[in-house]
Image: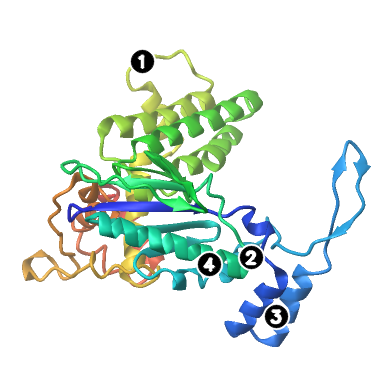
Amino acid sequence: MEKGSQVDIILLDFAKAFDKVPHQRLLHKLEYYGVNAKTKNWIQSFLQNRQQRVIIEGAASEQAPVLSGVPQGTVLGPLLFLTYINDMPEMVKSSETKLFADDSLLFRTINNQADSVLLQNDLTSLQDWEDKWQMSFNAKKCQVIRITPKNRPPLPTTYKLHGQTLDTVDASKYLGVTISNNLTWDRHIDNTIGKGNKTLGFIRRNLKDCTKPVKSAAYTSMVRPTMEYASSVWDPTNRKKIGNLEKVQKRAARFVFNNYTDRTPGCVTKMVESLKWEKLEERRKYNRLCMLYKIKNGLIDIDSHQYIQANDSRTRGKDRLYQERTSSEAFGNSFFPKTIRDWNQLPANTTPANTVEGFRSALKAHPDSN
């Protein structure tokens, strides 16, 4: 996008993903990847000899053996599924893939019609992988997002899977985050606000007679986490969006104090401060800076060399980072450019911390900088 190119993204949806993994083929792959016999036998015992039945209004069916699938709701299940599909990118010759459990992407920069053909060829190649490993994509749920620069008309292309044309959408959810074709986060933020208000409404109805500490704990454990999920990615710069997010917390403060009538200017701000709740905007910035620290110090496995470079200027501090000039608003407000700008504004004694805990403490010691 920063280079002014179109990117076509195909969001792949596995049909009954966790239920269809063949046990014997999974065990074969585990052996291929070097899992030792003892561990493999343990996993085999974990997967096999399971029984299932259906119970409706007390009436139970006969038990039947579970011949495929990895148990959902377990820690091991997604890891085993990811192991099973780990070789899928080997079928892709011209495009790129991203795998995360059953949320997988196939994408490519599209400069001309030939690029679209190459992306379609890679999508078709995945059908061979399906046939070989007894998995299948649900073409009805697979979607295409076409991300295009503002100043360039899109190159319209249809992509097909199993002979069915995939739907092209303006936005879709990936790993819990709504991605829009213009790379703004307005739709995701609106969804986040709606979800926060819905959860707040639930605890207001069920905890209205509880004490302030209980109400406060309910907000910080049930509502605020939904407002901050993946916020390092979508943290807004638009003041209206920032204000709308803060309004959810202000409503929560009124709930804690059971005060819905006082309209004195600043009264809700005082409620929030008395509860020692930081502004959500400040918390998002703090979390972004902590993530950048982890990436910079190799604690998160992200290929960041093209984004994080030391600043050559000796007058700006040895731990300052190079700020790349950006031509697109979407990229300029994305995680790396935005957080590097914030990083370079930190006091000089903050960034050289030797541990994450030390960096967090240094940030807390300078609240005006985060």
Q: Nearer the viewer, mark 2 or mark 4?
A: 4
CA gap, disc 2 to disc 3? 21 Å
N-terminal label among 4 and 3: 3
Q: Is residue 104 above or below residue 207?
A: below
Gap between marks 1 and 4 measured at Cα:
66 Å
Q: Reading the chain from its start, which is encountered first: label 2 or label 1? A: 2
Alpha-carbon distance for marks 4 and 3? 27 Å
**Which one is closest to the eye, mark 4 or mark 3?**
4
The reply to whether residue 200 is in sight is: yes
Q: Label 4: which residue?
A: 128
Residues tagged 1 and 4 counted as in contact (Cβ below 8 A): no
Q: Could you tell me if the residues under marks 4 and 3 are in contact, i.e. CB atoms within 8 Å?
A: no
The residue wearing badge 1 is 264
Name the residue carrying label 2: 134
Instruction: Between residue 8 and residue 265, name the one nearer to us.
Output: 8
Q: Nearer the viewer, mark 1 or mark 3?
A: 3
Q: Secondary structure at mark 1?
A: loop
Query: Mark 2–mark 3 contact, CB under 8 Å?
Result: no
